[in-house]
Amino acid sequence: MALINLEDVSKLYGFGDATTLALDEVSLSINKGEFVAIMGPSGCGKSTLLNIMGLLDRPTHGSYKLSNRLVERLSPSRAAKLRRDTIGFIFQSYNLLPRLTVLENVALPLAYKGYSLTRRLELASSMLERVGMQNREYFYPSQLSGGQIQCAAIARALVNDPTIIIADEPTGNLDSNGSRLVMELLSEIHKMGNTVIFVTHNPELTRYATRVVYMHDGLVVQDETSDLGQVAKTARRNLYSVPRKSVEDDLAGVSLLMKVMPEDDKKDELAEEKPKSKRRKRGTTIRRRS
């Protein structure tokens, strides 16, 4: 039985002539324990799909079952409780509160479960140790690197022990080292039995996924399984279809240019570029306007 099951789900925003179709009759099933990457151009509906799966939004049309519960029949309070207990969110912009320490940020979701302050801090500290951030417990977000902030955000997402992790471009603001750190953490979370769903624009990150869903203009246009450690087939075609230049290529080009242009030629070329000074003929006078 599917953990997540969407049937003909559509999402409309706006009214009348200003109506925007964000999702167009999307049908998608995700089983427990899958590691799913969602790819597609900006504005194709990826984030809208995540918001609906994460119970942050509701579909305009169609049905959505989460853990075999029909979402549209849930009251807002029951939906909020299901979201709190089942789903952990990781955002591209981190969304850590700047005036709280890392420990306090991670402990915050536990306050809504009624835990005492001491118990909240104990669980948060344990989760930070799990993601390698225990030595940064009393730092503020402004004192951390981008990768460290995202690791703290992952700890916050995991502190409620959710079964589903939803990540909206978790590496979008990170360099290559930070991206690798975050994806390795998500991979470890997946190996522990969690279902992980993440959005990415980077084909290289499909190496971590067991399945890749491609979207375009609010539609799911392709759905393929992928081997761990390998770039998905469709993503690989997109990755290598356009030749890319590295810094080494640029330096090699400059070096070659210096060899092709001998020193004397460069001097001659520079001399030709100098503007010629205008000389006045002898015996001529310059008349000034009175």
Image (spheres, helix red, strand yellow):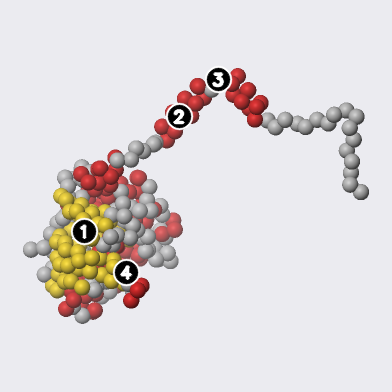
Relative to residue 149, is residue 287 drawn left or right? right
Relative to residue 266, is residue 59 drawn left or right? left
Q: CA distance from mark 1 to mark 4?
A: 17 Å
Q: Which residue is mark 4?
A: 20
Q: Where is residue 157 drawn, in percent x and y?
A: 27, 62
**As displayed, is residue 162 above or below residue 111?**
above
Q: Which residue is mark 2?
A: 253
Q: CA distance from mark 3 to mark 2?
A: 15 Å
Q: Earlier in the sequence, mark 4 or mark 2?
A: 4
* Residue located at (80% from left, 30% from top): 279
* Circle 2: element type: helix
Q: CA distance from mark 4 to mark 3?
A: 61 Å
The kind of residue tagged 2 is Gly
Quarter location, residue 215:
bottom left
Q: Where is residue 209 drawn, in percent x and y?
A: 20, 50
Q: Which residue is mark 1?
A: 220
Q: Earlier in the sequence, mark 3 or mark 1?
A: 1
In the picture as drawn, the residue positioned furthest to the left comes out as 1
The kind of residue tagged 4 is Thr
Quarter location, residue 253:
top left
**As displayed, is residue 274 above or below residue 132?**
above
- Mark whose residue sits in front, 4 or 3: 4
Q: Earlier in the sequence, mark 2 or mark 1?
A: 1
Q: Where is residue 4 drawn, in percent x and y?
A: 15, 64
Quarter location, residue 99:
bottom left
* Residue located at (23% from left, 60% from top): 219
